[in-house]
Image (cartoon, coloured by chain):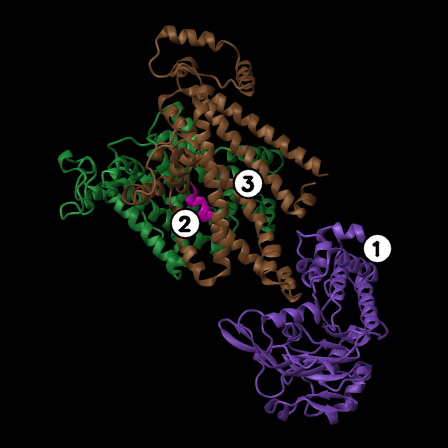
Chain colours: A purple, B brown, C green
């Protein structure tokens, strides 16, 4: 059974008094112990999707479609069920640990809070947390527990955040750009640690990021979002080699490569759209170098292709072309 | 590290008090007319003035006289009132209790009432609007206006409370000082309520509260452990100011309700130009003001660990 | 509203023209408009008092004391038989003039010191800040009482004392704004061009901190009104038979017990309404500029 199933999930948010659709019928599954990356530019709706799983949306938001956790519908849960769900089954790693941890309470307080809420005794909670701190690579746990967030660096704080999520032994981890706020060297350290811990414990993960490379390194499958729509969903390995969707190809082509020599860095022209800004037709049509009239008139549905799914009218024709773009032998145009 | 911080604050406290005391004592010399005449009060004959000049060593340099006064104060000698021909200390001894009771009563009302109303306003939309309107009016109501409104309604019309005086004993004081405490507390209560509402509202929207929600912590716990706890920081900072401002507002309320306290004595002494009393009481009030602020300052350090790092 | 809307009244033309500019951008805010209209109306009433008031404020017959509302006296009379409405109208003059003077003086003095402190920095700034810190320690009312005991009751001593007491609040706000302004590149540009320091301060720094100053001044007006009314209430301010709202509250207090609260209540309500108006206007101005305030 899949740990997480997003079934035609759509989310409306109140924007300037009116409800606007920001996530458009996303259907995605995460199997047990599987890591699925959710990739896209800022504003694509990926962060909102992960928050929707926890029902952590802003006031006034409306959820359509279904979110199923181990078969149970999340939107249908009442307050107590939702609390139990958040307490035991799912945990979220947020992007900016300094903002997401209460600055006037100790690290130890933060780490044990959820455990104590579940009814664990104080000594047992402390023991669990101590063990976890070493697992995430924090030494001198006893001292750290007594410290306050402002006394720790960003990297350490994020490890603390990760430890806190592991403490409740969830079945699913939601990671919302966990390393974006960190500097590059710390990023890889923390990411390696997170990946190891996840695999060791067999946890499923929905990994939200704008970094395609990172997602490919850590995840089993990658789902690509654009303007609130899911445009591609492929195994990480094959996506890395060649994309099925022009947008993904564009992302791959715009990776700066240390080995490429004086090749002009490709960029996808235009700017990303929110879901409600797109018109009829394919959401990517305005920026796609391969768009034809049909693309502008008719919105493509997500369908199975090769080992993944893709929403593009021209996927068969463009296959070879996109592989060449991905490997750098053809330009993105 | 913390000891150094506390030490710094205490030094600042002492310096402020010192300068304030100089200003209060020195004001005598800024006043028109010569000090001896002023000390003697309104109608003084030349011989009285001369004897005062001798008694107060007015031929001595300012610094010496100031020092004498200061050391006297620290030993409990608050000077001598020439109007009443008594030491100031004995004149105010009986009155201090009334003032302390009144100010304490009002402070409790402000803190408990203000925080409770503010919390309610932040957590419940509709009552929030009513509370905001009410507090805006409360903010604009001076204590003496509140006093006469309270007297009109509760003392004269409804006869629930006595109109004047401070009463004796605990129960008597409680009954007599309820209306005055409300009058004194009103505008500060309104201010605290508005501030609490804003602080709580802001905390509710923070990311760390989102984290607590995402972990499935019970709402009541989130509110107490994260929202209120953090909102307390700006509220405490302001509370110090309000309690200190109370000390000044107390003067008006005592006058309005005919309470025999430090405040009304200060007014009387000002009008009578009983300078020694004015000096002594001003010093007491300003000292209380500064000390309370210092305590609040230190309490802020306890509440917010980040300040300890910054101040170090 | 034109910049010349309010001519030479209690606030001098300088502060008025600034107020005029602000109002044109506030026209869309109903609360701010309502508050401004109320204030303007009040000022108009105060100025036109001799022509509007039905009676002279001190004309009264003790025999008709403490009368209720009637066609002859729209708000009744006070304990001396003086017409309450007329006393309220004339009372507006001093009740508004006092705070206006306080705010004017503390604004001018405070802004001057603040800009100077921001400009010179270093030890002048330190000195000014320390002095302000010490002034903060004195509640305004105590200051006023000390002043009265030195110089006698009336309007002058309390006004000066309160002006001194309010200066640090205005100074603190202006100083931080001025410091931020001073750090901006255009200031160095002016300096390099050879513009004398006082010109830079006056022509450039001042207009840019003016909005924040205005907000603080508006908000402080309410406090000043309350403080001064309290001084009069205590008998340390203006003396009878002059009409002033704070004084009227205290004069009418003895009548409350006899069942005639109208004098105290009427004056008290006027104070509340005026302070509410200034607070609302100040709040609206503040949210427009997103400033930090004392």
Side of A193 relative to B265 (left or right): right
User: Marks 3 and 1, Cα distance to the nearest angstrom?
Assistant: 60 Å
- Which residue has dot 1 on it? A139
Residue at 56% x, 33% y is B291
Residue A274: mark in rendering: none
Between residue A64 and residue A311, name the one nearer to us: A64
Q: Earlier in the sequence, mark 2 or mark 3?
A: 3
Residue at 58% x, 45% y is C179
Side of B6 relative to B30 (left or right): right
Q: Secondary structure at mark 1?
A: loop
Residue C196: mark in rendering: 3
- Which residue has dot 2 on it? C279
Front of the two marks 3 and 1: 1
Give the magenta part as a residue range: B185-191
C254 magenta-colored: no
Please identify the quarter of the rendering in which residue A327 is found.
bottom right
Task: Check whether the beta carbons of the residues at disc 2 and disc 1 lie within 8 A of each other.
Answer: no
Between residue A74 and residue A288, name the one nearer to us: A74
Side of A63 relative to C289 (left or right): right
Q: List x then y, in percent, for residue C186.
A: 58, 50
User: Marks 2 and 3, Cα distance to the nearest angstrom?
Assistant: 38 Å
Chain designation of label 1: A
């Amino acid at each position: 059974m899949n740990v997480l199933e997003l079934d035609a999930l759509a989310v409306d948010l109140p924007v300037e008094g009116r409800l606007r659709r920001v996530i458009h019928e996303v259907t995605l599954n995460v199997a047990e112990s599987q890591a699925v990356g959710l990739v896209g530019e800022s504003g694509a709706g990926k962060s909102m999707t992960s928050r929707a799983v926890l029902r952590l949306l802003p006031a006034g938001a409306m959820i359509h479609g279904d979110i199923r956790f181990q078969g149970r519908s999340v939107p249908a849960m009442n307050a107590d069920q939702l609390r139990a769900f958040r307490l035991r089954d799912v945990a979220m790693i947020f992007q900016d640990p300094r903002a997401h941890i209460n600055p006037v309470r100790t690290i130890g307080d933060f780490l044990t809070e959820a455990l104590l809420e579940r009814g664990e005794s104080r000594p047992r909670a402390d023991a669990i947390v101590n063990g976890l701190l070493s697992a995430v690579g924090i030494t001198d746990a006893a001292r750290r527990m007594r410290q306050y967030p402002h006394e720790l660096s960003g990297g350490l704080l994020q490890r603390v955040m990760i430890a806190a999520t592991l403490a409740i032994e969830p079945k699913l981890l939601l990671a919302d750009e966990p390393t974006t706020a960190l500097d590059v060297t710390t990023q890889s350290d923390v990411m390696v640690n997170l990946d190891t811990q996840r695999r060791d414990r067999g946890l499923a993960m929905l990994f939200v990021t704008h970094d395609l490379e990172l997602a490919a390194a850590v995840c089993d499958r990658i789902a690509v979002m654009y303007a609130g729509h899911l445009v591609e969903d492929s195994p990480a390995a094959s996506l890395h080699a060649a994309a099925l969707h022009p947008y993904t190809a564009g992302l791959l082509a715009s990776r700066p490569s240390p080995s490429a020599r004086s090749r002009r860095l490709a960029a996808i022209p235009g700017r990303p759209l929110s879901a409600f800004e797109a018109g009829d037709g394919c959401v990517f049509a305005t920026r796609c170098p391969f768009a034809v009239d049909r693309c502008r008139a008719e919105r493509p549905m997500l369908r199975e292709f090769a080992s993944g799914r893709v929403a593009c009218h021209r996927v068969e024709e463009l296959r070879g072309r996109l592989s060449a773009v991905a490997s750098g032998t053809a330009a993105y145009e | 590290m913390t000891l150094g911080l506390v030490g710094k604050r205490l030094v600042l406290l002492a310096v402020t008090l010192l300068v304030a005391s100089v200003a209060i004592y020195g004001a005598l010399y800024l006043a028109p007319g010569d000090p001896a005449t002023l000390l003697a009060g309104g109608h003084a004959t030349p011989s009285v003035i001369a004897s005062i000049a001798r008694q107060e060593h007015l031929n001595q340099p300012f610094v010496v006289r100031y020092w004498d006064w200061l050391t006297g104060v620290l030993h409990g000698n608050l000077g001598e009132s020439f109007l009443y021909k008594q030491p100031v200390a004995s004149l105010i001894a009986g009155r201090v209790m009334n003032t302390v009771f009144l100010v304490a009563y009002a402070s409790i009302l402000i803190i408990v009432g203000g925080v409770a109303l503010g919390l309610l306003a932040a957590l419940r939309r509709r009552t929030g609007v009513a509370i905001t309107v009410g507090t805006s009016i409360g903010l604009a109501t001076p204590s003496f206006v509140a006093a006469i409104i309270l007297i009109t309604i509760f003392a004269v019309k409804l006869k629930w409370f006595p109109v004047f005086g401070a009463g004796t004993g605990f129960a008597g004081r409680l009954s007599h000082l309820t209306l005055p405490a409300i009058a004194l507390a009103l505008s500060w209560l309104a201010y605290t309520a508005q501030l609490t509402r804003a602080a709580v509202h802001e905390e509710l929207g923070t990311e760390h509260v989102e984290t607590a929600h995402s972990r499935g912590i019970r709402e009541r716990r989130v509110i107490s452990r994260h929202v209120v706890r953090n909102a307390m920081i700006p509220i405490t900072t302001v509370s110090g100011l309000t309690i200190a401002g109370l000390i000044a507002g107390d003067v008006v309320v005592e006058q309005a309700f005919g309470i025999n306290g430090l405040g009304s004595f200060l007014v009387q002494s000002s009008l009578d130009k009983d300078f020694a009393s004015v000096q002594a009481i001003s010093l007491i009030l300003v000292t209380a003001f500064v000390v309370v602020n210092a305590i609040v300052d230190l309490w802020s350090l306890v509440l917010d660990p980040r300040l300890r790092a910054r101040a170090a | 509203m034109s910049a010349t809307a309010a001519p030479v009244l209690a606030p001098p033309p300088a502060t008025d023209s600034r107020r005029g500019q602000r109002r044109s951008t506030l026209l869309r805010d109903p609360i701010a408009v309502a508050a401004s209209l109320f204030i303007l109306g009040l000022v108009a009433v105060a100025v036109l008092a001799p022509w509007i008031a039905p009676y002279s404020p001190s004309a009264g017959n003790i025999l008709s004391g403490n009368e209720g509302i009637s066609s002859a006296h729209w708000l009744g009379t006070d304990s001396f038989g003086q017409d309450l409405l007329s006393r309220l109208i004339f009372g507006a003059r001093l009740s508004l003039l006092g705070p206006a003077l306080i705010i004017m003086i503390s604004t001018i003095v405070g802004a001057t010191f603040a800009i100077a402190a921001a400009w010179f920095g270093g030890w002048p700034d330190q000195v000014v800040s320390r002095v302000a810190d010490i002034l903060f320690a004195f509640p305004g009312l105590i200051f006023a009482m000390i002043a009265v005991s030195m110089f006698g009751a009336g309007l002058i001593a309390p006004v000066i004392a309160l002006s001194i007491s309010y200066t640090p609040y205005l100074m603190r706000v202006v100083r931080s704004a001025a410091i931020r302004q001073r750090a901006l590149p255009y200031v160095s540009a002016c300096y390099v061009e050879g513009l004398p320091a006082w010109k830079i301060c006056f022509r450039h720094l001042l207009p840019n901190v003016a909005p924040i100053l205005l907000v603080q001044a508006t908000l402080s007006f309410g406090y000043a009104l309350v403080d001064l009314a309290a001084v009069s209430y205590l008998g340390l301010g203006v003396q009878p038979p002059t009409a002033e709202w704070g004084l009227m509250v205290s004069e009418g207090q003895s009548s409350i017990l006899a069942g005639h609260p109208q004098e105290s209540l009427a004056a008290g309500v006027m104070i509340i309404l005026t302070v509410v108006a200034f607070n609302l206007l100040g709040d609206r101005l503040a949210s427009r500029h997103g400033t930090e305030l004392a």
